[in-house]
Amino acid sequence: VSTHTLYDVAAGPEYIRPLREEIQAITATDSWSKAALDKMAKLGSLLRESIRCHGVALNLLTLKRMAMKDITLIDGTYISKGTLLAATAHPM
């Protein structure tokens, strides 16, 4: 989860400043604790969204199939028997 969250922040650099400001404001008066983390609404939202998009449940929603025979698709792509194919549910 943490790796995907870092990727999400890197992909949306406009989120860095609001997250930093929230964290600095809360840690200026509170120590790093569960109570302090509970106050970090923006950070919590980021983590929940990252889990929603990249979490373990997403792997359960990935369509996985094995080619049962050699096939050439309409665009000319050749898929040999035994090839594992997968389509993620993320863009859906």
Image (cartoon, rainbow, N blue to C red):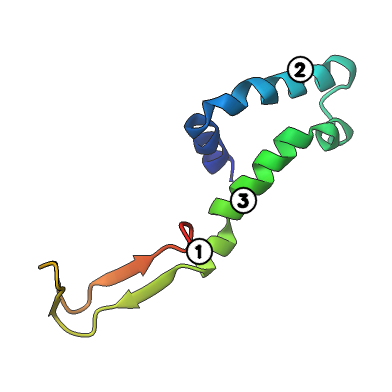
Q: Earlier in the sequence, mark 2 or mark 1?
A: 2
Q: Earlier in the sequence, mark 2 or mark 3?
A: 2
Vertical relation: 84 (above or below) 68? above
Disc 2 to disc 3, C-alpha distance: 24 Å
Image position, residue 25 (x, y; %): 81, 18
Image position, residue 26 (x, y; %): 83, 22
Q: Earlier in the sequence, mark 1 or mark 3?
A: 3
Disc 2 to disc 1, C-alpha distance: 35 Å
Residue matched to label 3: 51
Q: Residue at x 35, y 67 (%)?
A: 86
Q: Amino acid at mark 3?
A: Ile
Disc 1 to disc 3, C-alpha distance: 12 Å
14 or 32, which lies in front?
14
The quadrant in which residue 80 appears is bottom left
Please rate how many residues cluster around mark 3, counting C-alpha atoms within 10 Å: few if below 14, some from 14 to 19, many from 20. some
Is residue 48 left or right of 8 when viewed as pictured?
A: right
Vertical relation: 78 (above or below) 30? below
Q: Give the secondary structure at mark 2.
A: helix
Residue matched to label 2: 24
Image position, residue 72 (x, y; %): 12, 75
- Residue 59 is labelled as 1
